[in-house]
Image (spheres, helix red, strand yellow):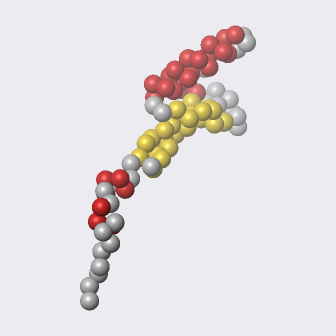
């Protein structure tokens, strides 16, 4: 006896089934100038450059409301690996 292979299985392209990963970053406000109790998750970005753009827009909005700008050191970027 032996294993009989289905003609359909022989046509599967294994490249379709290799796992690929994509890294995103969860931006966490770390409350480094407070007591550390006010940490919060803010947004998910695709890269460090996207984080810088997001922070720039956030600071522009804060300026409109008369609030102080926040710096990069006030945030942690937590890598999040997604498989597809």
Q: Quadrant of the N terminus?
A: bottom left
Left or right placement of residue 10 versus residue 67 in this view: left
Extreme-bottom residue of the structure: 1
Q: Is residue 51 above or below residue 22?
A: above
Residue name at image x 62 percent, y 20 percent: 58
Q: Quadrant of residue 2?
A: bottom left
- The residue under the point 66% across, 36% down is 40
Query: Is 49 on the left-hand or right-hand side of 74?
Result: left
Residue reaching furthest right?
65
Q: In the image shown, does 54 or 5 lie closer to the viewer?
A: 5
* 32 is higher (above) or lower (below) than 22: above
Which residue, as the protein is rendered here, is positioned at the far left?
A: 2
Residue 68 visible to an observer of this rendering: no
Residue 70 lies, in percent from the top left, at: 60, 20
Q: Is residue 71 above or below residue 13?
A: above
Q: Nearer the viewer, residue 6 or 55?
A: 6
Where residue 71 sits: x, y (%)? 56, 21
The answer to whether any part of residue 43 appears in the image is yes
The mark tally for this picture is: 0
Q: Position of residue 64 (x, y in %)?
A: 70, 10
What residue sits 45% from the left and 31% below the top? 47
Query: How far across and how far down the image is residue 67, in percent?
Result: 70, 14
Measuring 52% from the left and 20% from the top, which residue is drawn there? 53
């Amino acid at each position: 006896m032996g294993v009989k292979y289905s003609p359909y299985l022989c046509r599967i392209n294994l490249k379709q089934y290799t796992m690929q990963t994509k890294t995103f970053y969860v931006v966490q406000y770390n409350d480094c100038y407070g007591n550390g109790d006010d940490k919060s998750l803010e947004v998910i970005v695709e890269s460090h450059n996207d984080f810088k753009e997001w922070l720039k827009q956030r600071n522009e909005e804060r300026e409109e409301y008369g609030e102080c700008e926040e710096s990069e050191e006030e945030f942690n970027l937590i890598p999040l690996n997604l498989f597809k």
